[in-house]
Image (cartoon, grey):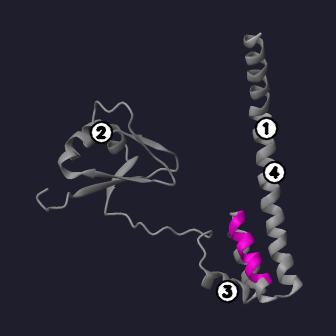
Amino acid sequence: MDGTATKLVYYQKTVGYNVGVRAHSLDNQGFLLTGLQPWIGVKEENLRDFKIANKRAISEGLILQVEEPAVDIQTPNALTDADIDTLLKNQAKLRAGVKNIDSLPIVLRIQEKAQDKGLSQSTLDIIEARIDELSDAEQDFSALERKLFGDEQEEEKEQKKKRSR
């Protein structure tokens, strides 16, 4: 390697739905720009091929060239111990903050810290209410998964039994 860094040009989707892009015109697999990954970096030497392969998306404004995107991830689930301590200082902050958290393990961690600190039952009740909400959602998903895929799995088992006879 000659020590020079490869310069990337970034493109980002501009619409609320997923957009498929290709690295070049013969790229059969491509890349999907989603809400979680809304941009793609293209090597400067491959930029001409990228533009040709994605001419329609560029001309219709589905993707635009942008400056290098920030890689900082902002999520209510990424809480440090200091963040949890701040939440636990005030019930109003806790009530507002815990509503945004959608990760059961994080809420369980908050509950553990609250219990370790010996906080009031009303504080623990706020946390337990959110745990119940998230647990119910998880159970609903499991039930839906069984409903959608459970019958297929049973059919596959029966077919295997028939084949083995």
Secondary element at tag 4: helix
Amino acid under disc 4 = Gln
Disc 2 crowd rating (10 Å Cα; few below 14, some 14-19, many 20+) is: some
Which residues are the magenta region? 104-115
Task: Name the foreground residue: 39 vs 81.
Answer: 81
- Circles 2 and 1, Cβ within 8 Å, touching? The answer is no
Q: Work out how far the residue at label 2 is from the one at label 4, CA to CA, in angstroms.
A: 45 Å
Q: Residue furthest front?
A: 165
Question: Residue beneath label 3, please?
Answer: 85
Question: Label 2: which residue?
Answer: 55
Whether label 2 touches label 4, CB < 8 Å:
no
Residue 86 locus on image (x, y percent): 66, 87
Residue at 30% x, 39% y: name it.
55
Measure the C-alpha gap from mark 2 to mark 1. 43 Å
Vertical order, 165 against 89 (above or below): above
Is the residue marked by circle 4 packed among few (<14), some (14-19), or many (20+) residues within 10 Å?
few
Q: Quadrant of residue 23?
A: top left
* Secondary structure type for disc 3: helix
Sequence-wise first label, 4 or 1: 4
